Image: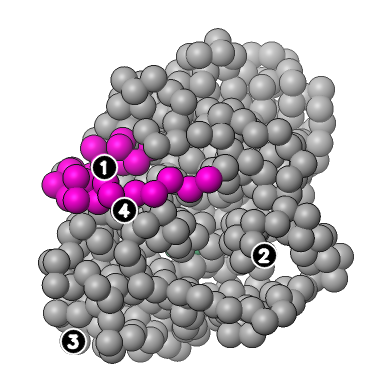
Amino acid sequence: MNFISTRGGSEPVAFSEAVARGLAPDGGLYLPESLPDISAQLSRWEWLGYADLCEEFFALFSDLPRERLHSVVQSAYSRFDTPQVAPMIKLDERTYVQELFHGPTLAFKDFALQVLGGLYEEQIARTGRPITVLGATSGDTGAAAIHGLLGRQGVNIFILYPDGRVSPLQERQMTCTGAPNVFPLAIEGTFDDAQAALKDVFNDAAFKDRVGLSAVNSINIARILAQCVYYIHAFLQLPKERRSNVEFVVPTGNFGNVLAGWMAQRMGLPAKSFRVATNQNDILYRFFRTGRYELGEVRPSHAPSMDIQVASNFERFIYFALGEDAAATRSAMEQFKKTGSFFLENFDAGSFRTSRADDADILRIIRRVKEDYNYVADPHTACGFAELDPEATSVILSTAHPAKFPAVIAEATGVEVTSVSLDALKALPIVKHRVAAEKSAIEGFILTALGKA
Ligand SMILES: *Cc1c(COP(=O)(O)O)cnc(C)c1O
């Protein structure tokens, strides 16, 4: 199976090459050349454990030898805290929560980044070239990337984050690993300052070459494919009589998670619909209502991992919505870059529904879900409960453990939630490096750390 770019200007490449590159050379995002039909496999997959299902699914796309794929996938999910990996909790006959927070950083990004870390390690073993991963984070992605890569052979990871502006628990997840290949860089300034400095470093071609620089971001195709798996798994966990009218409800920011579910549907998973649940940063909510995609200002919310301005994975959906027309995709993205908006005429949302929740809604919902079901939802998951289809069987994807947001949970319910692994972190020493948010300081730090100064 080859992978093509949404902008049509890059040659098709195999899976391992698409993973190594991340972004396609023409600036587009990789997608499988054609989507396989999985509908005939579903009954065979019914009894598979999570990692086995993931391995079967990746085998449809991957050019890795099967035993290598096996070891990447099995080791990725061996680090989750329950053998079920993605347990389904039944709240009532029509309402299920799929818990995606049993990985090392207690958020759903572990599903993809544990696999991606293993794929990077494979690549390094194959090419003999070590890599240096550099990223900027406002929280969850950085922690999940660090835990996907910590202790891996041949890779060092440097993550920039705004000092004092990520939650204390998120900071501990990044800085208390004790791993010698992990370097959390606390910069003075905001997340935007971190991103601007990051961009300058990536534009320095000589430096990039010298250290084998690689990005970690939400657009790698391996992340999307890894996320398809839990939709299939959830569907196969439902009682047979509940499978005809399934709506997946997905707390959404960069559109990576829900896109994966929708792609699984295009491959033959018989889900009926997908609800794009946003917080008050509702660019996608507005799009699915009107067909107009228009930049707004980011307003910090109780669900910070969904506080986005531009949904970086949205281009993949636009490509399909425009009839897999790369030229039209390119021009829509160019128009968006120039004017901050574009409009799809006669837009049909198809199997997408949408809802939004502001901070007051989030608090109200957390309280109500606790009262109705004795279940504590984290603030991101709470956005999913804003509006449920009374006719459907709803599967709400729970993207984070509530203990990551103790203050909001306490305000909503008066309950103190805890997690053994987060509590354990509080006893470990913080190791972080203060660096100025500028190219020369960051490059200097990296070269020294790699012994190349
Ligand atoms: C990243 C994140 C989201 C948003 O997921 P997208 O794939 O960006 O739509 C939602 N909830 C949590 C807890 C996250 O970390």
Q: What residue type is labelled 4?
A: Ser
Q: Which amino acid does label 2 sit on?
A: Leu
- Quick check: 383 above or below 437? below
Q: Return the residue at label 2.
A: 322
Q: Return the residue at label 1.
A: 53
Q: What residue type is labelled 3?
A: Asp
Residue at 65%, 34% (x, y): give it: 12
Residue 186, quarter of picture: top right
Dot 3: what SS? Answer: helix
Q: Are marks 3 and 1 in contact (CB under 8 Å)?
A: no
Instruction: Give the CA separation, mark 2 to mark 4.
Output: 25 Å
| Circle 4 Cα neighbour tier, 10 Å, few/some/many (<14 / 14–19 / ≥20) | some
Q: Nearer the viewer, mark 3 or mark 2?
A: 2
- Label number found at residue 39: 4
Q: Return the residue at label 3.
A: 372
Residue at 71%, 76% (x, y): give it: 344
Instruction: Give the CA separation, mark 3 to mark 1.
Output: 33 Å
Instruction: Give the CA separation, mark 3 to mark 2.
Output: 42 Å
- Quick check: 60 above or below 190? above
- Mark 2 or mark 1: name the one nearer the start of the chain: 1
- Quick check: 172 above or below 88? above
Side of 369 where 31 appears, left or right:
right
Q: Give the range drawn in magenta.
A: 34-58
Side of 447 where 109 appears, left or right:
left
Q: Toward the viewer: 118 or 380?
A: 118
Q: Which of marks 1 and 4 is in front?
A: 4
